[in-house]
Image: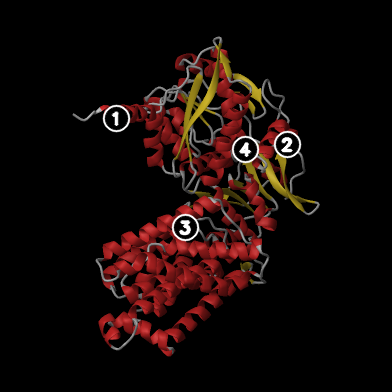
């Protein structure tokens, strides 16, 4: 009779290997944080910067021994997938991250549209999620209890730009041209309200699809409206194309503020087309907040630049700050219990290199960011080199407004 | 009124490039009944050709035009033998799946190499300003080159032996083979030519606008509309179709929100398929 031992031995090993692969066993002193990043698809540029912010924070915390809470020291473990910049993937992957990968805490994907989708899943499972890269206010007005927003909300994005513009020209003719995505639409609604309040008129209002590749027809409309200022944009690809065409077609504008795109260091590849373009920014490397804990903006900028060979924009800083705030909340809670950490986040009112962070505890807008303030940055030429300067608010400015 | 004229002129200039982009798609369909779903991705490789030749190697931007044509042709012939040859004469769904797979591979490789971050190649050519509206030199040059390349394609197809062989294969492959035409080689050359046209249109587009690895999708969709307007399989009609699409965009912009234009374009697409299934400009095939 043949021995069956080798067969059973191999089967046993195979089953054990499969079980080990299906449910990774983690040491007790590990916190798993799950999120998706847009490694492919149209949001890749900004999402990658955010991902690097998360990773830099994780590496620094782990190198320092981990997060201390309740007498334990927890190392950070990330579970992350590519969401392909698509809502459907976000929905599937956040469910997987919670149910299968057993993530204890969540970071959001990048962009308001994807954040809104992820927020439905995170709330369904009662997981604390720090949203960064999403400024839309709507998810916070739906009664969510575990969602905490790092960015200033969309309504504040162009408020500084309108004030700065009004100082240079009390009665500007404004063309407002924005992408038809949830974030830009939320900004648009706020601009309409602010313009009405400030007695400003919008001489042209146009929305465009995110896949627009030629802004020539829109620029002709801007010309036709005799506008001297343009506000709007959406995300990186469309914003960069619009800026280049505004320059090439000499649109005759004295002021251009675009959302998101000009904040990326890549925007400098537009050369002269970038000069004078301003961008509402959640953070700039020049800001000089005195942090209650963690690095200063200058220290963070140096560490990030050393690691990734590129200067951080606000997406990267937002990612890093989300990590710091979660870490602080866990330390304050002295536990990794969801309810205790959520409670600590509700009580947070701190200043980091990203600025002040405080979440609304009003049930009508729970988790909305109410502490953070934005700045307005502008691309200017200094000694033949393109640099981004802070021009608003006046208290934070590093250069005068180029108008 | 001036705003409308400026918009129309702008539309015609960009439309000529849409036409060039669609010419490759329609040529491949006309010759071998293959809808090349990798067309957009191949257009993007033409854009990257400009980036590497002009921005990285520092060559004059328009030197990328002949290089993109040659490299596109070689790439097309190779792709034909790898992915298209086996599905010639098979049901159309197979060619759709095969070229879609090529499309996914190309986008995957491109994203891994260059991410989906935008690239910009600053090309400065003097344009002209009329009543405050500026028409850039790059737009004018792209439209002129699109017209020249369309003319050269016409001469090639009608006045060279290879061109006539391509048209013969398009009209009746069996008869062409019986006449001694090496149809396999001719098909691969036609596919190469189609890809060369996609690549060079990408190069010209990149002189005007920044681009990402995913930009091809928008141009591929426009190419489908142009192809239907101009008549499936009719390269001369494609140029006219492109200009017509540019005109529609230019004429409608002053009167309606820009976000409605894709709806208008695809409405036109459906209308053409129903009313003129052979295309508005279906003068002759091949």
> Residue reaching furthest front?
A1
For marks 1 and 3, give the CA distance: 70 Å
Mark 1 belongs to which subunit? A
Pointers 2 and 1 within a single chain: yes
For marks 2 and 4, give the CA distance: 11 Å
Reading the chain from its start, which is encountered first: label 2 or label 1?
1
Residue A386's place in the image compared with B256, above or below, is above
Q: Which residue is mark 1?
A: A6
For marks 4 and 1, give the CA distance: 58 Å
The answer to whether one can see residue B207 in this image is yes
Q: Position of residue A289 (x, y in %)?
A: 71, 28
Pointers 4 and 1 within a single chain: yes
- What residue appears at the point 56 percent right and 29 percent down from the top-left corner? A150
The answer to whether one can see residue B219 in this image is no
- What residue appears at the point 63 percent right and 47 percent down from the top-left corner? A262
For marks 4 and 3, give the CA distance: 30 Å
Dot 4 alpha-carbon crowd within 10 angstroms: few under 14, some 14 to 19, many 20 or more: many
What colouring method underlies this structural image?
Answer: secondary structure
For marks 2 and 3, give the CA distance: 38 Å
Q: Secondary structure at mark 3?
A: helix
Q: Quadrant of residue A324?
A: top right
Q: Which residue is mark 4?
A: A314
Q: Position of residue B74 (x, y in %)?
A: 48, 71
Quick check: marks 1 and 3 in contact, CB under 8 Å?
no
């Amino acid at each position: 009779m043949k021995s069956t031992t080798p067969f059973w031995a191999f089967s046993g090993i195979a089953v054990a290997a499969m079980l080990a692969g299906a449910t990774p066993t983690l040491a007790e002193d590990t916190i798993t944080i799950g999120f998706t990043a847009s490694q492919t698809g149209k949001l890749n540029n900004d999402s990658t910067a955010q991902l690097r912010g998360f990773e830099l924070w994780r590496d620094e915390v782990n190198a320092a021994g981990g997060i201390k809470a309740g007498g334990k020291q927890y190392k950070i473990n990330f579970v992350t997938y590519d969401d392909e910049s698509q809502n459907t993937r976000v929905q599937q992957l956040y469910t997987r991250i919670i149910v299968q990968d057993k993530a204890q805490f969540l970071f959001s994907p990048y962009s308001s549209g994807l954040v809104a989708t992820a927020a439905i899943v995170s709330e369904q499972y009662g997981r604390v999620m720090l949203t960064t890269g999403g400024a839309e206010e709507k998810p916070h007005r739906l009664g969510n209890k575990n969602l905490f927003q790092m960015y200033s909300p969309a309504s504040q994005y162009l408020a500084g730009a309108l004030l700065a513009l009004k100082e240079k020209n009390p009665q500007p003719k404004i063309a407002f041209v924005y992408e038809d995505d949830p974030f830009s639409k939320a900004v648009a609604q706020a601009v309409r309200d602010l313009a009405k309040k400030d007695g400003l008129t919008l001489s042209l209002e146009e929305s465009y699809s995110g896949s627009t590749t030629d802004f020539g027809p829109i620029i002709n409309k801007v010309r036709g409206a005799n506008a001297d200022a343009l506000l709007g944009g959406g995300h990186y690809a469309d914003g960069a194309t619009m800026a280049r065409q505004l320059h090439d077609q000499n649109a005759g504008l004295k002021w251009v503020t675009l959302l998101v795109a000009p904040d990326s260091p890549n925007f400098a590849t537009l050369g002269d087309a970038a000069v004078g373009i301003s961008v509402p920014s959640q953070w700039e490397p020049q800001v000089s907040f005195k942090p209650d804990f963690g690095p200063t903006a200058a220290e963070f900028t140096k560490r990030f630049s050393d690691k990734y060979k590129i200067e951080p924009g606000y997406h990267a800083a937002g990612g890093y700050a989300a990590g710091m705030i979660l870490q602080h909340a866990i330390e304050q809670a002295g536990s990794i219990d969801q309810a205790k950490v959520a409670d600590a986040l509700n009580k947070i009112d701190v200043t980091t290199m990203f600025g002040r962070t405080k979440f609304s505890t009003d049930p009508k807008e729970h988790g909305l960011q109410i502490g953070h303030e934005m700045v307005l940055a502008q691309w200017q030429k200094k000694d033949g080199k393109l640099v981004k300067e802070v021009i608003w608010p006046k208290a934070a400015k590093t250069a005068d407004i180029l108008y | 009124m001036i705003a409308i004229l400026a918009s129309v002129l702008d539309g015609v200039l960009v439309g000529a490039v849409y036409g060039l982009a669609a010419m490759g798609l329609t040529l491949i369909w006309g010759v071998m009944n293959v809808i090349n779903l990798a067309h957009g991705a191949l257009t993007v490789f033409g854009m990257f050709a400009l980036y590497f030749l002009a921005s990285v190697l520092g060559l004059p931007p328009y030197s990328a035009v002949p290089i993109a044509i040659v490299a596109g042709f070689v790439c097309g012939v190779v792709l034909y033998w790898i992915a298209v040859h086996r599905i010639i004469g098979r049901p159309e769904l197979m060619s759709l799946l095969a070229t879609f797979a090529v499309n996914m591979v190309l986008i995957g490789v491109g994203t891994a190499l260059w991410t989906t971050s935008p690239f910009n190649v600053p090309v400065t050519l003097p344009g002209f300003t009329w009543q405050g509206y500026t028409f850039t030199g790059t737009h004018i040059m792209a439209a002129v080159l699109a017209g020249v390349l369309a003319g050269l394609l016409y001469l090639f197809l009608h006045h060279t032996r290879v061109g006539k062989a391509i048209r013969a294969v398009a009209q009746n492959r069996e008869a062409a083979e019986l006449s001694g035409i090496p149809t396999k080689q001719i098909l691969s050359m036609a596919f190469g030519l189609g890809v060369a046209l996609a690549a060079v249109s990408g190069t010209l587009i990149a002189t005007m606008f920044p681009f990402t690895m995913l930009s091809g999708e928008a141009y591929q969709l426009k190419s489908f509309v142009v192809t239907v307007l101009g008549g499936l399989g009719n390269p001369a009609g494609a140029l006219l179709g492109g200009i017509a699409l540019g005109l529609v965009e230019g004429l409608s912009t002053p009167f309606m929100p820009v976000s409605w234009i894709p709806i208008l374009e695809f409405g036109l697409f459906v209308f053409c398929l129903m009313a003129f299934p052979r295309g508005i400009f279906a003068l002759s095939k091949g």
